[in-house]
Amino acid sequence: MLDLTTVGYSAVVTPSFFVEGRFSARNETLEQVGATSTGLVDGTLLIDRSRSARRYWAPTFCGVCDPEERDNQDVFIKGSYFLSRHGAGSHNLVFGYDGFNDRRLANNHQSGSDYRILGTTSIISGAAVTPVFLGNGTTIIQWNPIVVASTGADFRVHSGFFSDSWRVSPRLTANVGVRYDKNDGKNSEGASVANDSAWSPRLGVIWDPTGMQEWAVTGSFARYVAGISTSIANASSTGGNSDTYQFVYRGPSINGNGVAATATPAAIQQVFDWFFANGGASLPLTGTPNIPGVTPQIRASLTSPNVLEYASGVSRNWGSRLALRADVIYRDYRDFYAARTDMTTGKVADKLGRTFDLALIENANADHLTRRYAGLNTQATVRLASTVDAGASYTLSRAWGNVDGESAAAGPTADSTLQYPEYKQASWNAPVGDLSIDQRHRARVWLNYGLPWVRGLTLGVLQTIESGVPYGAVSASGVNAQLYVANPGYTTPLPPSQTVYFFTERDAFRTEGQVRTDLAATYAFSPRGAGRLQLFGQLQVINLFNQFQLCGCGASVTASGGAVAVGRVDQTVRTSVTMPASYQTFNPFTTAPVQGVNWDVAPTFGTAVNRMAFTSPRALRLSFGIRF
């Protein structure tokens, strides 16, 4: 259920002073999202480790547990003042306050039963998926109990801003501004985890070299600061967050001969029968558990991730008929979220006296994590007649580094590169290359034509041409580095199931590019005597020619084809960790792994995971409205 409320007010105080204010509130309750059972069999999520952690059987999260509340409020006040003085140019001053409060109340069950089974592999026959649970260490039982219920997390940002658009002369305009943001974040236990502040300066100039308003040369610098991620900042709180304990299954192998002799419900029950008969949660752990409030912890205030942007451009107008524009942009991202576990972070004990390696959630600097973007944006528009206009835009860009910083499923994430550094090497654990958002070429061409014989009817066509996005052969269970590193003193060294290894370059492969044609017909009609009232309707045909590419760009018909998500393309990699009977282990510090011997891509690698991997099929949209 979603409730939206907005109240606004504006007033002209004097001919040169204008004020406006706005209050908005969003109240959302999420119910029935996830598993429909809390039973051990029906409510346990299964994960196929041999297929890029593909999920099946029971849905993620719990749909019959407590509902989740996601609420926010925003108070916005702005004043505008125009000042003109002889000999000093004119100033358009804008100043104000923005107060945002993000509140979340959630008991984050990871499945209906609070258990997951990370199986060795699975047997797929038509629509049926049957698990393979081997007792050789490749099947893991994961327990995610919630110990303390959430009381709600509140993350407030108080912001003040000021900008001055100063027309220095008929040929030169300067834009100077600054924004101040102050975080006040409290996690679901009420503890302060974010109280930093940041200044965001902005400077821009527009120069008309001829003074004829035909040319414009621009340059700008700005710093943009993101809000604190609620999920990251709340990760150290026990309230509503689940613990994570993993145990190696050492029981009898189930469906180990590749034949689905044991059905899924019986297979799950057999795993739990062995688990509880052999000690359950008292069994030895694999890897360091995640116990909010114990490990990880946030000991210093988190800093908001931010980016420095440099831009410059030039534009040329030929009256109202033709306009050309080109801009170059460079962005340098900073202060990524990161989890760090090393010999300096120390150890920590829980209430039962068990000792664990401590993980700290903090910000990482550019010495360890990098993300950069450079782009060239071009655009041309032309009016061919009073009822005909056309245009085109093209972007050439590159995004590169060694951290994406977010995922489609989880949003912002804390990078794990700084955890157990003795067991990793940057060249294969976090290599620099083109990032998953790197779409090198994007072009749009459009034409609008007002039919002269049907007044108010306009036809429009849009052609989209895009290149693919990169991905590599990488596995989160890539190698057993424990065999080649003397433990420097960790309680639980980095397990093979959590050791990321890039077997190829980060950008070794790319999805197909998207080519799509969209058509729109818009009809507007003004009833006689209705003043400015206008009735309109629009028909859109998305993907007119029903073209399909394996682009990762498919989505619902209401999303214009959706954003590109490379995860919709299979990226399964088989390794000596996930399939020890098929591949040989290797020393990651001295040996280059050989494809077919130490690892290999699955037969499904590079194919569609589901229909969303392809361009959205032809779809019709029909909308009606009233303009005042």
Image (cartoon, helix red, strand yellow):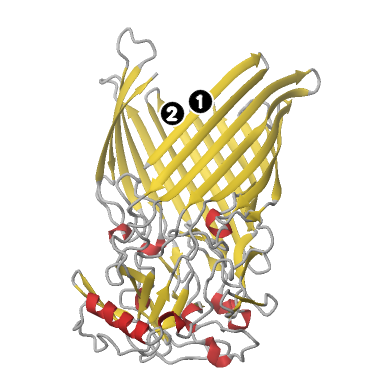
**Image point (67%, 19%), residue name:** 17
Q: In the picture, residue 84 is in which quadrant?
A: top right
Q: Is residue 280 left or right of residue 546?
A: right
State the residue lying farthest toward the right: 87
Choose between 58 and 549: the one closer to the eye. Answer: 58
**Image point (46%, 39%), residue name:** 26
Label 1: which secondary element: loop
Q: Which mark is residue 383?
A: 2
Q: Which residue is mark 1?
A: 320
Label 2: which secondary element: strand
Q: Amino acid at mark 1?
A: Ser
As drawn, 309 above or below 8? below
Q: Callout 1: 10 Å neighbours few (<14), some, many (20+)?
A: few
Q: Which mark is residue 61?
A: none
Labelled pair 1, 2 in contact (Cβ < 8 Å): yes
Q: Is residue 382 visible?
A: yes
Q: Is residue 257 left or right of residue 402?
A: left
> What is the x, y in percent for residue 174?
71, 33
> What is the x, y in percent for residue 160?
68, 37
Q: Is residue 223 visible?
A: no
